[in-house]
Amino acid sequence: MVQAPASHRWQQPLPTMYDLPSEDPEEPGLPDEFHTFQPTLLTETCRTPQIPLADCFTAQDLNLYYDPRHTLWHKRPDWFLVLGARRVERQEELRWSYVIWQEGVSPYLVVELLSPGTEAEDLGQTLRDIDKLPNKWQVYEQILRIPFYVVYDRKRNNLRVFRLEGHRYRELELSFDQVWLDKLGLGLGLWQGEYQGVEGKWLRWYDEQHVCIPTHAERFEQEKQRADMAQEQAETEKQRADALAQNQQESIRRLLALNLSVEQVAAALAIPVETVERLQ
């Protein structure tokens, strides 16, 4: 195998999956690392207080079939949320795809993570030729009429949110790269932090106090911290109780040494007679 000289080996950036041809020209390929991590984070933290979990279906990199007249036409959103879709309880029922004319309900929100070569289609900047399929923007806006369309460009740390108003998407003005969704009782925005050991800006759900909905790992850590605090508190209370009992015992012995009766000692220390008898 021919290798580049050491002095030139790292001068050029390595090609991405979007730069190299696929063995199937119709198949864009498997998701890159970010397209795996970010949708997983969205799914993991999408816990709305207003809608039962059983009524929320989330999916990532799942084919979305949208036209019963053209049963092979589909898009593959990076992540989407459906309200009111049937949730399955058995492994063999897990979806191979999401078929609109079978499910009977369209997504409520779709997230696309901009990739090299897909930005124009994701933002509706490509024109549809008469012999071409509709692009993502046209499918989400005009065919499925999805209420919210979210686009995140991680290279520019740029979040854009579009809301369906009438027959067209209108871009919302965001404050601090966040948007609140009343129907969900959740907000969606950019968060700087570490996820799966990777530091960066992530698209993430938050509650009405602007606190991020915790991941499984964060919830585990929070529970561990609460358990540790409870154990420390229990140990502190035990030490306090032991110290009190020891002080009471010393006081009882001193008073008894003055030839006071058990009843008199109890009255002097404002404790039950049984306690004096037990600690003397």
Image (spheres, rainbow, N blue to C red):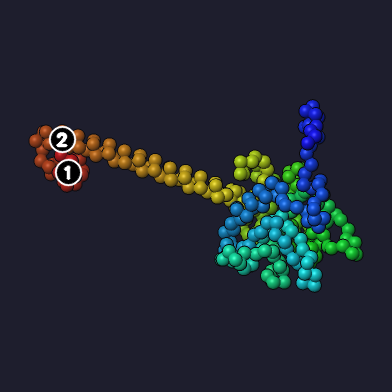
Label 1 belongs to which residue?
278
In this rendering, position of residue 168 left or right of residue 104: right
The disc, 1 or 2, on the residue closer to the chain's N-terminal end is 2
Q: In the rendered view of the protein, which quadrant contains the C terminus?
A: top left
* Residue 145 position by quadrant: bottom right
Q: Where residue 63 sits: x, y (%)?
A: 72, 61
Q: Amino acid at mark 1?
A: Arg
Residue at 47% x, 45% y is 224
Q: Amino acid at mark 2?
A: Arg
Q: Choose between 235 and 58: the one closer to the eye.
A: 58
Helix, strand or loop at mark 2 = helix
Label 2 belongs to which residue?
253
Q: Where residue 8 sits: x, y (%)?
A: 81, 29
Q: Where residue 168 sits: x, y (%)?
A: 80, 62
Q: Is residue 15 visible?
A: yes
Q: In the rendered view of the protein, which quadrant contains the N terminus?
A: top right
Residue at 80% x, 70% y is 70
